[in-house]
Image (cartoon, helix red, strand yellow):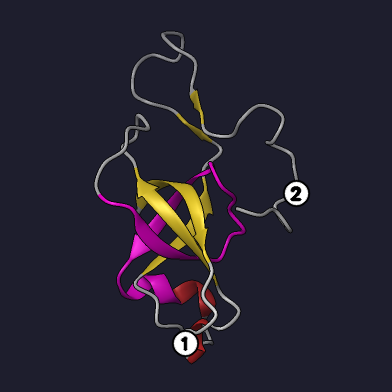
Amino acid sequence: MYLGRVVGCVWASVKAAGLVGQRMLVVQPITPDRQDTGKRIICLDCTGAGAGETIYWVRGKEASFPFLPTEVPADTTVVGIVDSIHLGGPPSSAPPVEAVPKGRGSAPRKGRRC
């Protein structure tokens, strides 16, 4: 699994039959300390992630597993939304890096647009 940040959505009026009804997001891969790394990618979304959220994603055959028994032609899929990231070191040395902006931690995910 890899960390990333949702930076946009993809709207397609024509796509493969297996992708009909699936959300596609533009994701910027990041390091654990939230620095951009690599090129942006397109991921299917099975979580309802919104713009600006820190997520984790998978690639390869596992990218199609969240949609079973439907077979989707997916190479990358968002499989989780990150609440917080705790980097190494003693707990008292620094507060955790918050991945969810203040006030959004308890907001419902359904219906949120990217």
Q: Along the horizontal axis of the image, is 90 left or right of 78? A: left
Residue 7 image offset from top left, x and y in percent: 47, 48
Residue 76 image offset from top left, x and y in percent: 37, 66
- What residue is shown with label 1? 71
Residue 106 found in image quarter: top right
Q: Along the horizontal axis of the image, is 25 left or right of 60? A: right
Q: Along the horizontal axis of the image, is 80 left or right of 93? A: right
Q: Nearer the viewer, residue 14 or 22?
A: 14
Residue 82 image offset from top left, x and y in percent: 51, 42
The kind of residue tagged 1 is: Glu
Q: Nearer the viewer, residue 12 or 44?
A: 12
**Sequence order check, earlier mark of 1 and 2:** 1
Residue at position x 55%, y 80% in the image: 13
Q: Is residue 11 above or below residue 30?
A: below
- What residue is shown with label 2? 108
Q: Nearer the viewer, residue 67 or 42?
A: 42
Residue range in magenta is: 39-64
**Element under disc 1:** loop
The kind of residue tagged 2 is: Pro
Residue 86 image offset from top left, x and y in percent: 43, 28
Residue 42 in magenta stretch: yes
Q: Is residue 104 above or below residue 92?
A: below
